Amino acid sequence: MTPDTDIERLLQQELAQIHGGKPNGVARRDATSEATPSEAPLPILPEMAWRGMFVEYREIMRDTTEASDVAHFATLWAAASVNLGRRVSMYAGNQIFPNAYLLFFGSTGDKKTTAARRILDYSLLHESVQVVPNVGSPEGMLDALQQSAHDPAVYLCFFEEISTLLKHARWQGSTLLEFFTETFDCPQVYRPAYRRIRAEINRPTPSVLAGTTPEWFWKNAQAEDFHGGFGNRFIFFTGSKKRPLPWPVRVDESKIESFASRLHSLATIPQTTVAFSPQAKRLFGEFYVDWEREERSGLYGAAVKRIPMYVHKLGMLYAACENTLPEVTCDQTEASIAVGRFAAECARVLVDLKSTQPRPEGELEQRFLAWLEKHDGSRKRYMQQTLSKYAGSCEIFNRILLNLQRADRIRIDGGEGSRVYLNSVTR
């Protein structure tokens, strides 16, 4: 057996040990090891968030799906926001409307899509609301909106997988992200400069309800999406899938129809300028000062930039659903702040998960080769200690080494374990 074959056999043995010697590739996990971000406990939505129509909706959805209650919370928030449209607003440096960009992330198979689809399955949206699904270009978005005669143009962008939008936005010359960024604040009119044919949207009032898995999200999302404004206009949610339900119950049709009717009534309330009650104003002021005092930097700091604005948005929504307009009460404000802090922790989880996502193997191979140019002849263990964070797992790390060895880009010398040395091959 040749030395190269010996080394390859040793690397393959390491891969087998990673998988616990099982052919199905299920890795063993040491119960005493430190939890990774994906294994760490998820933040819990405070119970005070469940009030009024939200707690009623949770009860209607109980035992009908394994989806997290947080996914139902985000779904109802989206429905109530678009039904309200521009009928309520608050002033906080500029005019704030209740529209929201909501993103629920979780693992594959956690039924988040099931929860989100109920906004359509049970007709939770008023007939004046336009639903825009899976648009691949700003031109397509404008064409869809111009088909509606409603003024203002209140619409819900429903993306079962937000990565589809991000992928289309990466097309050369696409201004799709700019479209969502510029319309988030609900201008009086939107006139895009990139269309030859004159287009104009009167009082665009967009909301977004979207889902994703961290893996798919970070395959397409980039740091500049947050620092550039698109990503930091979202509020992020996550939650654990419920216990298995082999026989989920049907949604009670009479209850959901009555609920939807009351939800539709939000689209007919009089135009109202909303304000915090004196106690609520003091409470929000204390929160805001405390929030701004905390040090947040990098991607996480950008991702939670608009949490105080979302406290306003949710406060208006609570007030409209609970018939306290034109005032947001102190307890409604307290609940909104609690949801804002919860969403900030969800954003932290999503950002932390970015570092655990494996890089594309071509990119990893180039990183490995660049490292070897500076550390030719180093021990494999030293390389693994410095580069495994980019690979995401020992399995991927060893696979990259095997690929480079088979392509005659590196030479692996030595014996077992830490006595393996890596050398670049001059081509």
Image: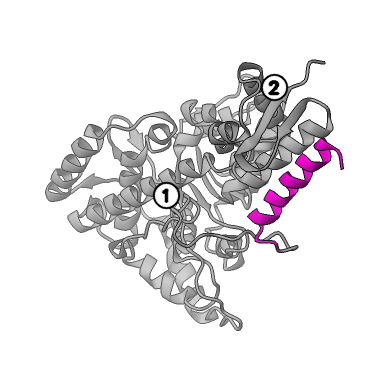
- What residue would you read off at disc 2? 173
Q: Nearer the viewer, mark 2 or mark 1?
A: 1
- What residue would you read off at disc 1? 346
Q: Residue at x 46, y 60 (%)?
A: 239
Mark 2 or mark 1: name the one nearer the start of the chain. Answer: 2
Give the Cα distance between marks 2 and 1: 32 Å
Q: Quadrant of the N terminus?
A: top right
Q: Is residue 283 left or right of residue 189?
A: left
Q: Is residue 265 above or below residue 235?
A: below
Residue type highlighted by circle 2: Gly
The reply to whether callout 2 and callout 1 are in contact (CB within 8 Å) is no
Q: Quadrant of residue 265?
A: bottom left
State the image coordinates of residue 389 (x, y, percent, origin top left).
Answer: 55, 37
Q: Secondary structure at mark 2?
A: loop
State the image coordinates of residue 245 (x, y, percent, origin top left).
Answer: 56, 79
State the image coordinates of residue 45 (x, y, percent, origin top left).
Answer: 36, 60
Question: How crowded is the residue under tag 2: few (<14 C-alpha within 10 Å), some, or many (20+)?
Answer: few
Along the line of sight, which residue is nearer the eye, 56 or 29? 29
Along the line of sight, which residue is nearer the eye, 426 or 90? 426
Along the line of sight, which residue is nearer the eye, 269 or 294? 294
**Farthest right residue in view:** 1
Q: Residue at x 31, y 46 (%)?
A: 311
Q: Which residues are magenta?
A: 1-21
By secondary structure, the bulk of the magenta-drawn segment is best described as helix
Q: Secondary structure at mark 1?
A: helix
Q: Is residue 380 left or right of residue 30?
A: right
State the image coordinates of residue 288 (x, y, percent, origin top left).
Answer: 22, 38
Which numbered marker is on residue 164? none
Q: Is residue 31 left or right of residue 373?
A: left
